Image: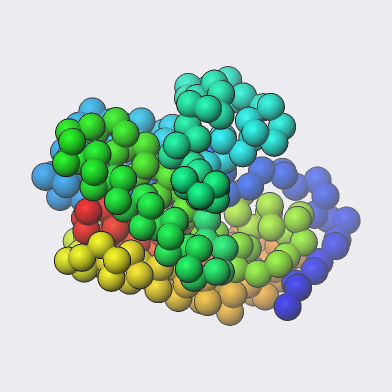
Amino acid sequence: MRLFLCLPLLLPWPGSAWDTAPHQAITKAALDSLPGRVRARFGDEAASLAEVYCMYPDRYLEMVRFGFVRKSAGPRSPEEIRIYCVRPDGQAVHGATGDRDNDLASLVYLFERIIKCFFESRPTEAARYAGVLSHFIADSLSPPHADDVDAAVHAAIERSVPAFTLAGRTPQSAGAHLLPAAAAILDRIYAAQDLNRKDLPAMVKAVADRDERTLDKYRLAAAVQAAGILADALSTL
């Protein structure tokens, strides 16, 4: 089903997507909720994970497709970060595609490399892979990614997220073994997408009505879900 809405009133709205600030907020909320022993495995890289590494997939595509390099801190060429954003089979790791085998392969790729980097005491590389994991989960749970919507509506829905934390929430392990844990995380991603898909007509209406309060309710719910899934995935590893 395509939820298509083309209204002149949408055109003046900012065109930015679920980009830097929301991704950073989701990643930071997840990291802040982790037990100290889990967070400590990233060493001094936690801040960079939340501020820079969680944007690697977008920055990689920007550089590859458009030759665009952001002025902010971070990679200056796609070659610097290809290993984190592209699997050995050439498949980019960005967000859930709906192909279960492909999506599971992406999660397993990231899980394996984070675990390996932890085992080899390489916190910087672990944090970079974890940043891509954060982006994968957050993009997958961005509400308009649950269905095919008009670009202007898409941008309006996901341009921001209210401030939030996961205070009071204790991360839970997704499983004792890598493959079942990755599958459990993917199941939760798909379940959250289903919920977003159900709520999307109400979000589209809120865009048309310029109802930011209603939009923020859905944005916040999606962001909290994404941060919780990320926190549980990192606690599992």
Q: Compared with residue 83, is residue 90 higher up or lower down, i.e. above or below?
A: below
Q: Compared with residue 33, is residue 148 higher up or lower down, i.e. above or below?
A: below
Q: Compared with residue 171, is residue 163 higher up or lower down, i.e. above or below?
A: above
Residue furthest left in the image: 37
Place residue 189 in its image quadrant.
bottom left
Residue furthest right in the image: 8
Q: Is there any visible trace of residue 227 in the rendered image?
A: no
* Residue at (28% x, 45% y) in the render: 114
Tell me where residue 62 appears, x and y as whole percent: 64, 35
Please state which of residues 57 and 33 is positioned toward the viewer in this rendering.
57
Total tally of numbered discs in the picture: 0
Tell me where residue 85 appears, x and y as whole percent: 49, 42
* Residue at (81% x, 46% y) in the render: 12
Place residue 174 in its image quadrant.
bottom left
* 215 relative to 205 in the view: left or right: left
Place residue 230 in its image quadrant.
bottom left
Residue furthest front in the image: 89
Tell me where residue 78 appears, x and y as whole percent: 56, 29
Please state which of residues 211 and 84 is positioned toward the viewer in this rendering.
84
Q: Is there any visible trace of residue 112 in the rendered image?
A: yes
Please state which of residues 14 and 107 is positioned toward the viewer in this rendering.
107
* Residue at (39% x, 57% y) in the render: 107
Please state which of residues 8 and 82 is positioned toward the viewer in this rendering.
82
Q: Quadrant of the N terminus?
A: bottom right
* Residue at (50% x, 35% y) in the render: 82
* 23 relative to 63 in the view: left or right: left
Tell me where residue 149 appears, x and y as whole percent: 73, 65
* 64 relative to 141 in the view: left or right: right
